[in-house]
Image (cartoon, rainbow, N blue to C red):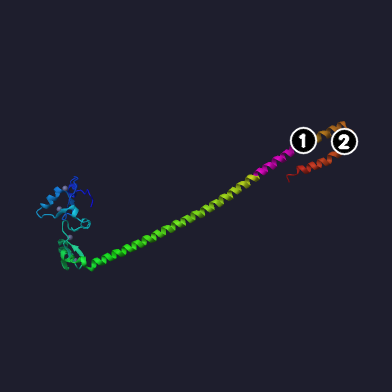
């Protein structure tokens, strides 16, 4: 039972008082002062110490929901329903009615309570089983998730590996290509210089040298020039 339950009547009047009693007629907690008032009504209310009230009594309504203030004192055998006197006069006039005291007599030894307990036990079993199944399912899902993650990580590392290799390939080939081109360029520069020198030699020899010497020069330069043409064709 809650330690500091408040008086319901005082709360309705915006006051907070610790409830120390329970009114069975109003089905609510009451403070010491209010409990006296409830006992002093023309039809005195049944007020008891709050510590003596069980949880079941506190949560089970004993007042009719449809007829305010009417106690549920009767039991309709035909409709298997607990009633108040107004219910009886309105809708259960033709029914087989017992007083609740009589209807509840022997319930503790009856098969009804045994059956109910049995059913609750069964429900508990079913709930436990379903819970177990859910636990198994959840661990299965977790396992699958881990496996999927593992597979994904493997795939990721394979892809990264491939990409790295591709990067290296591109790098190597690019550098090699650039190196080749620069060495070809150097060779072309020196060839151009040689060609220029040859041309100058020929022009000079045309003016200054004898025809015999020019002949020698031409015969010397023709094969050299052929070689150069071959060298300059390396790019093909
Ligand atoms: Zn009361
Ligand atoms: Zn009060
Ligand atoms: Zn009623
Ligand atoms: Zn009835």
Residue at mark 2: 214
| Residue 26 against residue 220 in the figure, above or below | below
Give the mark toward the camera: 2 or 1: 1
Instruction: Specify the label residue 193 is tagged with.
Output: 1
Question: Number of labelled discs?
Answer: 2
**Would residue 181 be counted in the magenta stretch?**
yes
| Nearest to the observer: residue 103 or residue 93 | 103
Disc with the residue nearer the chain's start (2 vs 1): 1
Contact, CB < 8 Å: mark 2 with mark 1? Answer: no
Instruction: Specify the label residue 6 is tagged with.
Output: none
Assign a secondary structure to mark 2.
helix
Measuring 33% from the left and 63% from the top, which residue is drawn there? 125
Place of residue 114 in the rendered image (x, y in percent of width and height, measured from the top left): 25, 66
Place of residue 150 in the rendered image (x, y in percent of width and height, measured from the top left): 50, 54
Measuring 68% from the left and 41% from the top, which residue is drawn there? 179
Measuring 86% from the left and 33% from the top, which residue is drawn there? 205
Whether the residue under disc 1 has CB within 8 Å of ligand 2: no
**Would residue 9 be counted in the magenta stretch?**
no
What stretch of residues is rendered in magenta? 174-193
Classed neighbour count for the residue bearing mark 2: other residues with Cα under 10 Å, few (<14), some (14–19), many (≥20):
some
In the image, taking residue 42 as reference, residue 205 lies left or right, namely right
């Amino acid at each position: 039972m809650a330690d500091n339950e408040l008086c319901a009547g005082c709360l309705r009047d915006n006051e907070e008082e610790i409830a120390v009693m329970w009114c069975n007629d109003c089905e609510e907690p009451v403070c010491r002062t209010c409990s006296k008032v409830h006992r002093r009504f023309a039809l005195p209310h049944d007020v008891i110490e709050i510590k003596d009230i069980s949880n079941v009594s506190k949560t089970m309504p004993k007042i009719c929901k449809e007829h305010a203030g009417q106690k549920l004192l009767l039991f309709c055998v035909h409709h298997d329903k607990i009633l108040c006197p107004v219910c009886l006069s309105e809708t259960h006039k033709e029914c087989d009615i017992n007083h609740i005291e009589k209807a509840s007599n022997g319930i503790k030894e009856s098969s009804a309570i045994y059956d109910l307990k049995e059913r609750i036990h069964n429900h508990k079993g079913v709930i436990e089983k379903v819970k177990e199944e859910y636990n198994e399912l959840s661990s299965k899902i977790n396992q699958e998730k881990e496996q999927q993650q593992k597979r994904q990580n493997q795939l990721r590392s394979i892809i990264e590996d491939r990409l790295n290799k591709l990067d290296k390939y591109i790098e190597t080939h690019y550098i090699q290509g650039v190196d080749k081109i620069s060495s070809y360029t150097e060779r072309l520069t020196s060839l151009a210089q040689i060609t220029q020198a040859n041309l100058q030699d020929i022009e000079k020899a045309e003016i200054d040298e004898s025809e015999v010497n020019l002949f020698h020069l031409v015969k010397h330069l023709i094969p050299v020039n052929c070689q150069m043409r071959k060298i300059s064709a390396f790019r093909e």
